Image (cartoon, rainbow, N blue to C red):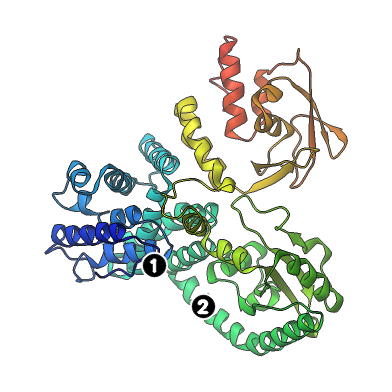
Amino acid sequence: MRVNLPESYSPEDVSLVMRAEEFATNAHAGQKRKSGEPYIIHPLAVAQTVADWGFDAQTLAAALLHDTVEDTAVTVQGLAKEFGPKVAELVDGVTKLGQVDFNSEGTNRSHENLRKLLVAMSRDLRVIIIKLADRKHNLATLKYLNEEDRVRIAKESLAIFAPLADRLGMGRLKAEIEDAAFKYSEPERYAELSRELSAYTKKANRYIAKLREFITSKLAASGVATVSVEGRPKHLYSVYKKLTKTGKSIDKVYDLLAVRVIVPKESDCYQALGILHQYFKPLIYRIKDYISVPKPNGYRSLHTTVFALEGRITEIQIRTPQMHEEAEMGLAAHFFYDQQKLDKKQPQGVPKNLQWVGQLAKFEGEMKADFVDMVSHDLFVDRIFIFTPKGDLFDLPEGSTPLDFAFAVHTDIGLHAMGALVNGKMQALGSHLENRDVVQIITRRSAKPTLDWLNHVKSSMARSRIKSWLRSQGIEPANHK
Ligand code: MN
């Protein structure tokens, strides 16, 4: 067998993967990649990625078989007979996604395609996992394609697959996809910036070494052990975005360096933060506690930006090993941990912080025509966190209003909203909420939606609820976007 399997696999798991590998090898016999290598290299690489992420044997078998329906005489029915309905379904899902053309913007076809992606994702996230692993290998071998295909795949990866990896909390994959795609989406800028960044890194190395030493010894002196302290520049594409956004050159931007301090326990994180602030003055607005309030994709860590040694402004991230694993691996880490916990049970559950994915399936039935626009918008814009007065957290698209929040809490609260207290002050239902606002909705039984409400909501959920209520009253909201 040519795939290294996770140790947790049972003998049946191993035999399923072996059969899939043999089947795929025979099915692709004689086919070649653009690189001239035997085609089977590709499904093997995809399967290895999925195995490294710790996924189950069905996902791995489906990864090996993922191109057989598209590129050979094999059928979904044939796979079902050979490997069972679940593996066949996964391959079918990946095949359908493969036919998606994400670039034909604005046409019905691209909407239909994006719809397929979202629906496949909400049915079984493992389809997306295989697709992401497939994309990772295709990006790694992009140089063998012609220029037009290279640029198209690179841009599509930046527009769709990197944000998707991010939303699934897969930080490492997101960075890999972005850097691999950037190389082909803007080859000249990429080359120039890699040169600049490597010169910058060389200069920064001595500083980083000193800082590591300083942090490790100061924490140890205060009784906080460190698992590791590492510093490095951020990945190339995020540097590129930063420079583009600020219009500055590389030596004028201060937060290109991130130092990551890994400590054993959650309580150590806060202790370490306190100790470091005794030595380094923090930029006060840049202390972020993503441990008590994780990002919507599950990311947890403490961030602080400080005047460190030599007065250099440096970002420090403090987290435990498990938080680190989850930040890098995201969904994959959750599946992995779940798998260990559940011991052999199929890890199909969606982690709590990714439940928004499950909501997509519900939206689908309700919205039809507007569905794709709305959901893809929600999926790819930035999110803000809004609290109830009791501290419950809701994750909404940036630019959301108290009305969006009302519908997120409960449809009935939305339908009868008449006012909102934002951080204790009365605000209009259509006012803009800021990250971490505390919002209380005031309702009245006699209050009800009007057409105008559609101008004051941002989330697809609120929009669809208002529209369906209006329709139930015989009001046609068709002209309102
Ligand atoms: Mn493929």
Horizontal side of 127 relative to 376 (left or right) equals left
Secondary structure of the residue carrying numbered label 1? loop
Count of number-bearing discs: 2
Q: Residue drawn at (15%, 57%), measured in percent from left and top?
A: 27
Asked whether residue 151 is in view, the answer is no
Q: Distance between the residues labelled 2 and 1?
A: 38 Å
Asked which quadrant contains residue 26, the reply is: bottom left
Instruction: Please name the amino acid that badge 2 sits on.
Output: Ser
Residue that lies at the very extreme toward the top in this rendered image: 474
In the picture of the structure, the residue carrying the numbered disc 2 is 194
Instruction: From the top left corner, tell me how far across and down residue 117 is, in percent.
Output: 40, 43
Residue 75 seen:
yes
Question: In terms of depth relative to the viewer, which is nearer, 4 or 179?
Answer: 4
Q: Which dot, 2 or 1, sits closer to the camera?
A: 1
At label 1, the amino acid type is Glu
Dot 1 beta carbon under 8 Å from ligand 1: no
